[in-house]
Amino acid sequence: MKEGFRQSMAWLHTWSGLLVCWILLLVFCAGTASYYRAEITLWMQPELHAAASNTVSTEQAAATAQSAMQERAQGATRWFITLPGERNPALQLGWSKPSKPGEKKKGRRGNFHSEKADPSTGEVLSKPRETRGGEFLYRLHFDLHYMSALWARWIVGFCAMFMLVSIISGIVTHKRIFKDLFTFRPKKGQRSWLDAHNVAAVLPLPYHLMITYTGLVTLMFMYMPSGVTTAYKGDQDAFFSEAFPARAGEAKAAGVAAPLTPFAPLVRQAEQKWGAQVGLVSVNLPGDANATVTLRRAGGRDMSSKQPTMEFDGVSGKLLATYGDDPGGASSTHGVMVGLHIANFASPLLRALFFLSGLAGCAMVATGALLWAVKTRQKQAKALAAGKRPGFGLRLVEALNIGAIAGIPIAFGAYFWANRLLPAGLEERPKEEIACFFGAWALAAIVAQLRPTRAMWRLQLTVGAILLAGLPLLNVFTTQSHLGVTLFMGRGPVAVAAFDLVMLMLGLGLAYAAIKLKPLPARAAKAARPAVKADVTPDTAAGAA
Amino acid sequence: MSASAQTEKLPRLRLPEALRYRLGVASRSVAAIVGGYVLAALATMLLSVCLPMVRVEAVMTATLASFAIYTCAVLWVFATGSALRAWLGLLIPCAIMAAILQSMDALSWSLA
């Protein structure tokens, strides 16, 4: 902080990164997984694998949905119909009923019912096992778990701000950012970790900056409400209805029954106007004379998260209003930034690149944390050689590193194993799966705190490798859509096969790291070189984390 | 009271070097996290009411930029020579922006 600009920025980079790196690693891992949250959910519901390949037009699907809803959702005041798209082959039907007077509230989603239906017949798909699937990982990356979402979002936002500061100050400290891209000096202890950190951070640097900033932007009106309150004199609702005008109408029920207009012509009209598919149909007060039908364009046509909507009279089918056809500059920018973060527009190849960049982000955080430990251990090398114990901070960081870098893959593995092994009819099954996630992780983290040694790294990396790489094998015994079927017989959804293969690769990566970490030969102790190899820190990339 | 005692300077309060360093870091951390946020929030307010755009667009623009402002403030706090300069560098622009907002009668709403 005193020696000069670059030095003070290096200091800032180190500390702003280190203090929050373990939470950031969790956020990065869960967020990266969220790119495939639909696929993960599909993988976690093997009962749906057979039905996951059909092609029905959106018009036909909307008509099917309408008759299915009229049959099954009687008395509901709101309908939500998600039409099938590329990544979700099933119809998603949801409806909410008003709570009866005197009825005990059943929580936030108490009166909301949702189910998946076949888009050609409207029949409910064979009831899959209950799971939160990829949705849990998605929520985890900003709502955390076992705490209020509000607190969690502030914590994650705080960490994201640290991350942003860390990235910017990290860029400033670089003398030769371009040259560093092509520098890797393996098996050189601290030097190698520095190079690995540079490559993981600099190569996808635009991605890291983008994902951090846009992450803050997704919740910006919560983190920075002062602009809204100032310009709108405290009336936040006025702002939101101006900024996000497509909020479904809050019309009162007329109390007079009237038949609902058919959806198919409305969908045709909207698709002609937009030149793109309709993604969501929502109905307010179905069956009432004041009913309205709102159609929203499916995501994926442009980068923005904001999709235009059209509102129709629910009885006559007359167009009432259109929203979001011509958003302002700042509003579009906001939509694109949020859209970039959630990447709904991404084609399969682009999505894979996002996923790889996310993994590089995990590697950046992990190697940064390891680098601090290796450096600090070197600073204490003399004392350590004299038989002293490592300082408190060093020991803590080394233990947290094991618990986070090797422990998070274990938690993910435990979650997926629990999905296959817990009985399908178990009460509160989703909760139990999540308990397995955190139980396994807590165990890994606590054991790491007790014995933060090189052997512990090996042990935990091996466990993670077995859990992840073992998933395809587990699938053979527990499902009909394992790699033998999906890969060699060409049946079953591609997403399931891809999930198995990615898990296999990640597991092999962890196994590679564990193998590279063979027990230190005795000669390391007598090595006189200053670049002593760290005792507890692995020499190979933990990028698989 | 002898003359020598009068000319003798009072021993300045000197904290140990390590403690001074730590206090400096602590002070800067508070300045960066709290002061930086206040600066960013005030800048957001000011831009929200001053940018020559439709109101909703101005608010959107200001809020989008707020995290960049926050980041710059944090970098300034740790880059500048002393913790005192860091605080002054935050407080002076904060005071100016608050004064402008006050004169526009827009400050009270932001604190609500």
Image: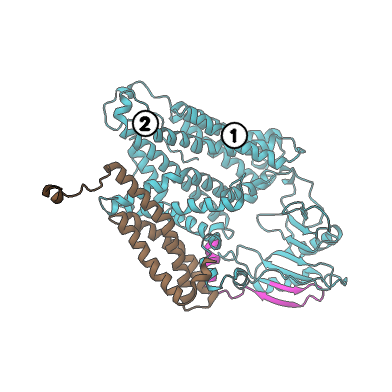
Chain colours: A cyan, B brown
Q: Secondary structure at mark 1?
A: helix
**A48 horizontally vs A301: left or right:** right
Query: Which residue is depicted at the point 59% across and 64% down?
Result: A305
| A274 w.r.t. A541: above or below | below
Q: Which residue is mark 1?
A: A440
Residue A379 pos. (x, y %): 31, 35
Q: Is residue A327 on the magenta stretch?
A: yes
Which percent across, then down, holds residue B45?
48, 69
Name the residue type under label 1.
Answer: Ala
**According to the image, label 2 marks what residue?**
A534
Tell me how far mark 2 sits from mark 1, CA to CA. 27 Å
The residue furthest left is: B3
**Magenta stretch bounds:** A310-338
Q: Nearest the camera: A540 or A285?
A: A285
> Residue at coordinates 69% horizontally, 38% vertically from top-left?
A432
Note whether A366 is above or below A166 in the view shown.
above
Query: Going by the picture, which residue comes out furthest to the right?
Result: A257
Tell me the amino acid under the disc marked 2. Answer: Ala
